[in-house]
Image: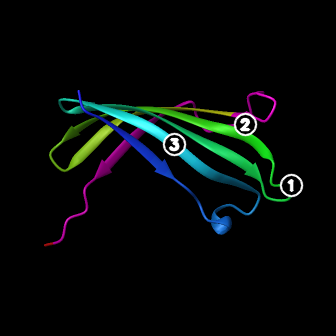
């Protein structure tokens, strides 16, 4: 199964309260299915200190130019306490953008 690594960084203007300043993840393709995990490090803009982390696990199925799947989200503060979060399971839907 091929595996790929993901990395992103957000600009300071991305979130005026906390900065999800760095994110790293990995995904693995298995036929038409893709499984992955993503972790974002959250920094406090005022103190520039670690404020917590956001973890996203996902599984999608690709069919042609579209995908469907599910994600699970968890967010913790700097002490490791679970924080407010979106629904822990959510549906994912997407379609490739193509030009005519």
Q: Determine whether the residue tagged by mark 3 lies in a helix, strand or loop.
A: strand
Look at mark 1 in the image and give the residue it sits on: 47
Q: Going from the N terminus, do you reach mark 2 or mark 3 first?
A: 3
Main SS type for the magenta part? Answer: loop
**Image quarter for residue 47?**
bottom right
In the image, what residue occupies the spot 41% across and 36% down?
26
Q: Is residue 59 left or right of residue 46?
A: left
79 in the magenta segment: yes
| 87 and 34: which is toward the camera | 34
Q: Residues within 10 Å of mark 2 (few under 14, many from 20)?
A: few
Q: Is residue 71 left or right of residue 84?
A: left
Q: CA distance from mark 2 to mark 1?
A: 21 Å
Q: Residues within 10 Å of mark 1 (few under 14, many from 20)?
A: few
Q: Is residue 14 above or below residue 58?
A: below
Look at mark 2 in the image and give the residue it sits on: 84
Q: Is residue 100 above or below residue 62?
A: below
The boundaries of the magenta stretch are 76-99
């Amino acid at each position: 199964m091929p595996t790929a690594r993901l990395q992103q960084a957000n600009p300071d203007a991305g979130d005026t309260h906390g900065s999800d300043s760095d994110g790293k993840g990995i995904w693995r393709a298995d036929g038409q299915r893709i499984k992955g995990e993503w972790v974002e490090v959250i920094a406090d803009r005022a103190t520039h200190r670690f404020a917590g982390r956001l973890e996203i696990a996902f599984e999608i199925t690709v069919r042609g130019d579209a995908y469907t799947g599910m994600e699970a989200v968890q967010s913790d503060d700097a002490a490791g306490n679970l924080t407010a979060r979106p629904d822990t399971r959510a549906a994912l839907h997407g379609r490739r953008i193509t030009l005519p």
